[in-house]
Every structure is written in structure tokens, then in C-alpha cells.
Amino acid sequence: MPPTLPAERAASLRRELARHSQAYHVLDAPVVTDAEYDALLEALRRLEEEHPELVTPDSPTQRVGGVAAEGFAKVRHAVPMLSLDNAFAEEDIRAWLERMLRRLPEGTTEAELGFVVEPKIDGLAVALRYEDGLLTRGATRGDGTEGEDITANVRTIGSIPLRLGAPDGGGGAMADGSGGMSGRQAAIRIPPLLELRGEVYFPLDAFAALNERQLAAGLPAYINARNTAAGSLRQLDPAATAARPLRFWAYGVPDPEALGVATHWAMLDALRALGLPVSPDARRFESLEPAIAYARDWLARRGQLKYLADGMVFKVDGLHWQTALGAVSHHPRWAIAYKTAESEATTRLLAIAVTVGRTGRLVPHATLEPVFIGGVTVSQATLHNEDYVRERDIRVGDTVLIKRAGEVIPQVIRVLPELRPPDAAPWEMPAVCPACGETVLREEGAADTFCVNAACPRQLVRRVEHFVSRGAMDIDGLGKKLAAQLVEAGLVHDVADLFHLTAADFAGREGFAEKRTENLLAGIAAAKVRSLRRLLVALGIRHAGDSVAQALARRFGSLDALAAADADSLQTVEGVGPEIAASLTAWFSLPHNAELVERLRAVGLQLGDPDWVAPDEGGASGADGAGGVGAGTGAAAGGAPAGPLAGLTFVITGTLPTMSREEAKAFIEAAGGKVTDSVSKKTSCLLAGEAAGSKLAKAQALGVRVVDEDALRGWVAGAGRG
């Protein structure tokens, strides 16, 4: 009998619609026509209009809702979304395996590692967060550490389930172990918290249809499916995103322990069982050569695909091996992207312009006669640096060969000298900054040229953005748009001017009510007492990133002491070599930068850490607390970080009761400890929370001590290590 009560009827319609949606978007095997699906959806919509109390967050009627947003809030990823290292030849993949085997215990075999090969979809990477199975957040990759909240927009994508789990209450299709997905069913436990990563893309047939509609309406056609997908996902009005037929494929989970699986292949199975779409072209192999052969054959058929893909991704299958291999700052060691051959074309180079980045790096760019390459019209290309131009003798007026490296970044490969006009002159890097006129610096043996003037106007907006960012002075509410407005209005000529802003400067400015202005000014005032480490990062001194800044703060304690140090003294600090020392001394030697430091001092910025004690006196060495007084004492020689956790190396796993992993890492480092990604014999302790998995097993096997958050806090508070 069909359900008669409204609640029963609504639940039945939602189950039916979810089943059809999964058949269409996930299994690619629709069982009803679009008209039949629309009729079911309309019936549910009418029922919910009559009984608003029946509306649920995961109802298919709620995929588009709410008003257009004013902008996108920032989202900090709990686990960074790293890039992938690239391979452009089969030998590069074999070399990747050799590098991994050298890092692993002697005798480790390919069969023990296992390999999964998946298409590298050319779309927009996103992170999805599910709580108790319900979609609660979607975010862009951004810079890998911080993205944008696009939850309202990802909810409009039919292949992204609003609630995890197969519509019939069972599991989804599982893998058969040899390639492709079988029809077997298996229940999968839905974790209370699951974050997953995947790619949003624009199907090529849908993209072609979109362009047909554009042209029929007298509008210009979109050039590239990948960029159109990205632009569609960043529409401020979710209804605009809903009008674009975007699709999604899931490819990973940053914390596979949440799914209780031991391999990447099993993780893909689990994602599919939860109702998520996974590429049907993913395959698992026991050894590398068959994996390479599969990738070779697949890439040869790439032109037949219904979506853009720029290669294949090779991943080590065993999750404990992934943990053992770890990652470098930009990419995991256990995965590599095998990119396709680049598209190439010839065109005429019209001009060479030099731009100035936030760090002051001067980068030459080529302006080209527009040329169509691999589905994209290219009119600009990077020339990298001065040596790149000189070695290839690239001149304005030349006919040049262009390629899209990895089908993304256009670059000039070589000149066709037989087509060179007789008046084409050799190009030279400007001797002064094109933005401020300051003499530029190119260090001996370095490839790049820099403007090291902190007051350079071209760098100013980006310097302000960097200065106020979360990893630096952390001034909440002062983002990219406002930074540009303040500079354009003449209110900010360098970062010290931020501390002169008053409520009158925001009066009448759109979006600045009294409360917002108060909060912003309070945030600016709070930034006056940030740690020396944060200040060094905020100043944007080349090569002085977070880890170097922390080491310098521990060693010198104040900006004045650091400014007075010579290159030899600087190189006694761990992680500081000749290049970093030269960058620091060059920065402090410039009059513009010295004036900036004095202006920061004059507005009340505290330029040293208040509790710093010279390392040779055995004191604490600059934890990242708020504050800072005066100049501190001079630089003392030697010494290691002091603190209750000094000399201990930690690995963090599982969900901690009160701290995120990032907070736990900062807590350990502030107490003198060190945090690494993988468990080894050198690991002192494993900090384990709820749902600890493979790292816990490895720690126990190696005899590594396991502690919880309470024990860690006890150590730092002085209760002893037990």
C-alpha cells in the first residue's frame, strides 16, 4: 500500500528521489526519464509547501535555497590540501618508486605497497565536510591551507549527496579488486565526522550545450570548461550555480582512519558505498609496470572522454605505507601525477612586461598574439626569469613556440630564429623596479631578481594582505578587498599606517556599520602585541617563512637584535644558510625598511617577545604567545629550544577532546617539542585521540610511547612525564 500520511509520503518521495539521483549521478545508469524525476520532485515540493514542518536539510528540494551571498567566508583546512609532484615520462614514475623504496625498510616490495591509478580530472578541487552523515560544509582548495566557503553552491550539484548512505539503507556498490566496480553490496559505518576531497568538473557535452545557448543569445562563448566550472562554483548566487550542470567525483579522505580502512582502494570502495561518485576508471595493481601500461593506454584514449583530464595519478595503496612515506611541504611522497604531453602552437610575441609580486620578485611575462591551444585562447605566457629569456634569446617581435605545461600554464619554449624581424633587439631585465624606481637586487648564483623596497607601491596591497593574514598578524575582518580599498583611498602607504586608522576612516564606507568598525579596530589594536615570530612572517622578508621565523625568534628575541646580527651570526641559527642570511641582512640594510621598523615602533608595536631569555642563560626561547616588549637582549650564541617538551618528537593521530591537530602542534612546539607526520623509531611519543588507527598500530609495534591529551597537558603544566 502506498503511504497515506504526509510524513510517510514525504519520506517515501525523498527515498525514491535519492535512489534515482544515485542511479543517474553515481552509477551512471538512470532508471527513469528526466520528466519522471521532475514529476516526483514537484510532488515532494508541493507536499513540503503544504506541510513546512516536513522539510529536512537533506531534502532534494533544498539543494538551492537562500539569497545571494555578499562574499565567501574563509575556511581553514584541518589537513592541508597538498599539490602533487609531476611526472612527464614513464621513467619519472619509475624514479618515483625508487625514491620511495629508499625511504622504506630494506626488502620492502612493490606487492606490499600496491598501486592505485586514477584519472586526474581537470576541474576544481573541493573539500566536503559531513557531520553525522549530513553535508555541512563545502570549501574550495584555495592556497591549500585556506579556501572559501561555498557550501550553498556545492549543495546544488546533484552528484554530491546531501546525506551519506545508500538510499535503500544498505551500502553502495563495492569494488571487485581487479578494476572497475562490481555490483556487490556492503554496509559501511557512517562516521560522525567525515571530510573528503574531490573534483568538481563540467562535462564536455554540457559545456558545448552551454556555449550553444550563449551564442544563440548573442553572448560570447566560454573558452574553457575547467575555468567555467571554477567560475560557476564561485557564483555568489547559488541559483546561478544550480543552472550549470556540474558534476563531482570523490578521490580521497584526509583521515582514512575515520572509515576504518587499511588501503586507498578500500577507501574508494567505502566512499562509493556511502553514495559518493568515484571514477569508474580507477584501477589497483600489485606492481608498477602494469599500472604504467594501464595509464599509457588510458591516456591514448583521452580524446574520447566526456570530461577534461590532464593525466593519471599514481598512489601507493597501503595507508600505513603512505604514513611512513609522509610528505614534503608541497606534496605527498606517496603519490605522483603523470601528466600528458603538452599542447603546442606558434604565435608572435608582441611585448615583454615585468610584474612585481608580493615578495618583490620581478617576473617577465610575454604578451602574445592570441592563439588557440588545447581548447584555450592564450594571449599571455610566463618567461620565468632573466636567465630563461637570455638563454633562449627571446625578443619582442619573435615568432615563438608556446606550450601549455600540464595543459595549465602557458610558457614560451623557444624562438623560431628564421622568422625574426631584423630590428628585434635583445631583452634586458630592468635595472630598477618598474613600480617604485628602487634599484633591484639579484644575488650571486640566484636566478631571480627582487625589489627589496618595503614601500614599493606595486607590492603594497599584497604586502598588506600578507601582513594581516591569519599566519601573520591575524587581523580579522581585514581582507583582500578592504586592503585594496585602503591603499586606493590613500589611507595606507605602508603596513604601519594600519595602526593609525580610526573610526572616521570607515564612516560612510559601504558595509561598515558601527559594530564592524569597532571589531576591526579592536583587531588592529590586538595585533600590536603579537609574537616576534608572527611579526617576522608578517614583514614578508624573503625566505623567512614560519619555521625560519620561529628559529630566529628563539635565537634573538627581538627585531633590534636580529637587525644588528651579521651574516655569520645568522648562520648559527638552525635552518639559516648563506642565502637566507643574505636576504635578512639585505632587508634590514635598506633605509625604507629601517624607517618602517621605526614607524611600527612609534605606533606601539612591540618588537620583541616579553619572556625571552638568551639561550645560553637556559631560559624559554620565544613561544608564540601574544605580546612582546622592548628590544630584548642581544643575540646569544648556541642553545637549543627550552621547555618541558624539549628534545621530544611527537606524531599526532585521531580526534583529540579539545584541540584540533593544528592547535595541538602549536601547543607542542610552544613547549619546545617537535611534530612530524609519520611514526618511526625516532618518534618519542604518539599523541592519540579518538579513532586512532594505523599510526597507533605502528607506534605500538615499534614500542613508541602513546599518550593522550590530558597526559600531554600534565607534562607541560609540570606534572612530570610519568
Image: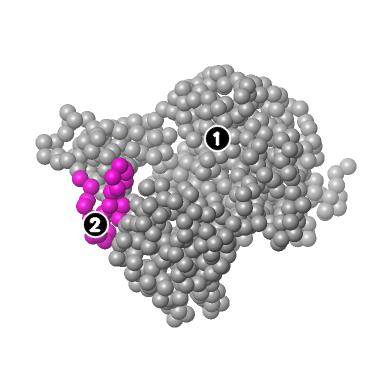
Foreground residue among 138 and 467: 467
Name the disc covering residue 439, or none. Answer: 2
Residue 254 spot, x, y in % from top left: 63, 43
Residue 350 spot, x, y in % from top left: 22, 43
**Residue at the spot 39% in from the left edge and 30% down from the top edge:** 342
* Residue 589 visible, this orientation: yes
The local crowd at label 2, few if under 14, some if 14 to 19, many if 20 or more residues have their Cα within 10 Å, is some
Name the disc covering residue 629, or none. Answer: none
Q: Tell me: residue 595, above or below residue 208.
A: below
Looking at this rendering, what residue extends furthest in the right direction? 1
186 vs 278, left or right, is: right
**Residue at the spot 43% in from the left edge and 54% down from the top edge:** 544
Q: Which residues are magenta?
A: 428-451
**Which quadrant holds the N terminus?**
top right
Q: Main secondary structure of the magenta part?
A: loop
In terms of secondary structure, where does tag 2 sit?
loop
The local crowd at label 1, few if under 14, some if 14 to 19, many if 20 or more residues have their Cα within 10 Å, is many
Residue 305 spot, x, y in % from top left: 52, 29
Q: Tell me: residue 290, above or below residue 125.
A: above
Circle nearer the N terminus (1, 2):
1
Q: Tell me: residue 226, above or below residue 242.
A: above
Foreground residue among 7 and 423: 423
Residue 468 spot, x, y in % from top left: 47, 64
Foreground residue among 186 and 598: 598
- Magenta stretch holds residue 434: yes
In terms of secondary structure, where does tag 1 sit?
loop
**Residue at the spot 19% in from the left edge and 43% down from the top edge:** 427
Mark 2: which amino acid? Thr
**Residue at the spot 71% in from the left edge and 40% down from the top edge:** 704
Say which residue label 1 marks.
Answer: 333
Looking at this rendering, what residue extends furthest in the bottom direction? 504
